[in-house]
Image (cartoon, helix red, strand yellow):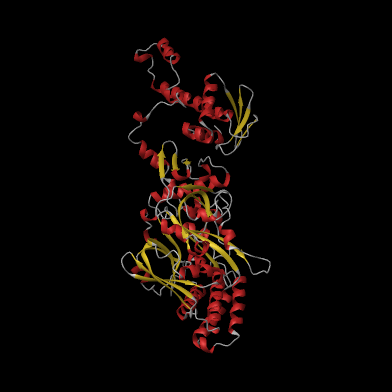
Amino acid sequence: MSAFKEKFRIFSKLCAEDYLIRYANKGLYKRSLKELDNGVTVRYTWNESSVSCELSDGTQCTLEDTLDHWNCSCPSEHICKHVLIAILYDQRKHSLEDSISVDEKQMPDKDSGISEKNSLDVLKGLTVPDSVSNVGSNRDDSNVVSHGASREIESRFRWMTESDPSVLIKPYSASMIEEVVFRLRYPEEVKIIEDSLLTVQLTSQNMEVSFTEEASLAKALCKVPQTAGKLAKLEALLRYRALKGLDDTDALSGRVYEAKFSLQTVQECRMMLAGLLKTGLARLPQSYMAQLETLAIAAHSGNLPDIERSLRGIQGELQLFLNRHIRFSMQSMLDRVSKLYLALQALEEKQVSTIQQSQLIGSFRSKYFTVPSLHLYGLGADAWETRSGFRGITYYFYCFDDGEIYTYSDVRAVYYDDQQFSYTEHYGAFTPWLPHVTFRQFVGEEVQFHSVKVNEEHRISSGEGAKLTILPRSGVETLNMGKIMQDASSVLQEESRTFDLFTAPRERLAVIKVARIVDHSFVKQTQDLVLKVESADGELLTLTLPYSTDWQTMIQRLESGYGSQSLEHFYAFVRVESRRISPISFLKGQTVLSLKLDIGNGRMGRLGRA
């Protein structure tokens, strides 16, 4: 027997019913069995690495020892019944030959008292055994599975837990691995089915992947086509390995993260910061701002995006100091300089892992990846404008799936004379996911996203493919928002001065239960509106809103007590900063009131009636 003939025989024996059904479909499999029962035969011609199969109906197909590569003379673009017939015919033929060979060895001779005629009668009465004739039948064999079947299955699929993961993921690009690693952060209900294949079902994604006993992800079966199917295979394998207690972080991070940057720029930045710390702010020369700008440009060219952002942040704080602005914070300046200096030192000495170097370097553009679903609860919207000439509205949502805050931002550059951004117009515009729902309605709803793209900072993309469903909104009083729901004392506690070099800074957001608004006043020296509120525990808390001409109406109405006198027992969604607590919205029952965007339009009364 040729070498390939032996390989094909092994392959055809492994092509069990569930394997072929998952590769094709049940209807096609049953039609193939019916054709065989009706007398179709196959003639094989063995080649060096393939076999040419000619069916008795004239169809010709070429097979290898895998279903990934085949060819058939019929017009079908997908796997056809002729390919299945060629495999199943080989199975039946050699199962029958094996059975006859076994029976001949066990058959008594004439000396045992059985005549030649009786021997012929035995041969004439020989039929195809059940194991062959019932291929494809739906009978329940669960009662005849041997006690060692589970051990045999475990042995056949041992490669899924014992193989080197770096070898298994070798065919995957870094971007594909990065997307799968991102999806693994989200909870998923996983079901395992073990038979002739090991099937991993990802319930929330309505997807399943079936693995063969061959140690290759390419041999796994998944009905999801193309790249999405390839990602599903890797995700299913990694979730299965995680269920078995295996941690593949090191193998995956080695492929995903890169740390290429300009060491010279890092050294120059560190030396400049060392000079700043030695000289002090009061004695800095006027040229120091220009030096910061030059180094920020160098950091951009040297593939150091987070270093560039940090330098520009220091530049902004220094500008406030030089202008003697009341909002300058020495502590904030010290934090910025200290964190950047430590990051530069870690990059220069290269004593941290590749993944940590990558986290210190950052990225110029945030990558968005598809997640199966997000169950979100609208918390409010905040309008803003930056010194660099950008305007936008950010919409905040609490996610029931992972207990985190997710955002969607509508942003425009307005530094050109002909560019405008109307907060009222954009707030009343329609969402990209449901054309009949405005952003004002969107942020006041409870929603379910399917196949939506998000990034590391939990920002939601408006890209195509996401499906949005509006759900009945629960009252805020009935929700348990975990770490987001805080009492006044925990919010008032001074934040620790420590910081993590390897995580991006995030807004500190909280939802506080408020009994009533005690007082309101406008501080002319700082140009802030100050609201004093009493928490449900009787503690006083100061909420601060900075003045801007865009919010003049809102400030005046809150200062006069418009609508706030009758407002009791509600929740405040706030941003906690180093020196102030800024309210974003008030929530009560099913109603959300975004302060900057709703009070100026006279919607304060809705919350009081809720």
Q: Is residue 592 above or below residue 434?
A: below
Q: Quadrant of the N terminus?
A: top right
Task: Provide residue 504's location: percent of width, then percent of height.
Answer: 48, 67
Q: Can residue 497 be seen in the rendering of this structure?
A: yes
Q: How many marks?
A: 0
Left or right? Give the position of 568 relative to 558: left
Vertical relation: 206 (above or below) 187: above
Camera-side residue of 363 and 33: 363
Q: Residue at x 54, y 42 (%)?
A: 224
What residue occupies the far right of the structure in this picture? 418
Horizontally, residue 419 falls left or right of residue 466, namely: right
Q: Residue furthest left?
A: 537
Q: For this rendering, which residue is in front, 25 or 532?
A: 532
Asked whether, in this view, residue 168 is left or right of residue 494, the answer is right
Q: Position of residue 17 (x, y in %)?
A: 47, 31
Please name the residue shown 31% across and 66% down the image. 537
- The x and y percentages for residue 519 are 39, 71
Location of residue 509 with respect to 297 vertically, above or below: above
Q: Residue at x 54, y 75 (%)?
A: 313
Reply above or below: 166 against 271: above
Q: Is residue 17 left or right of residue 109?
A: right
Residue 376's x, y, as percent?
46, 53
Residue 10 visible in the current orientation: no
The C terminus is located in which quarter? Answer: bottom left
Which of these two is toward me, 339 or 530?
A: 530
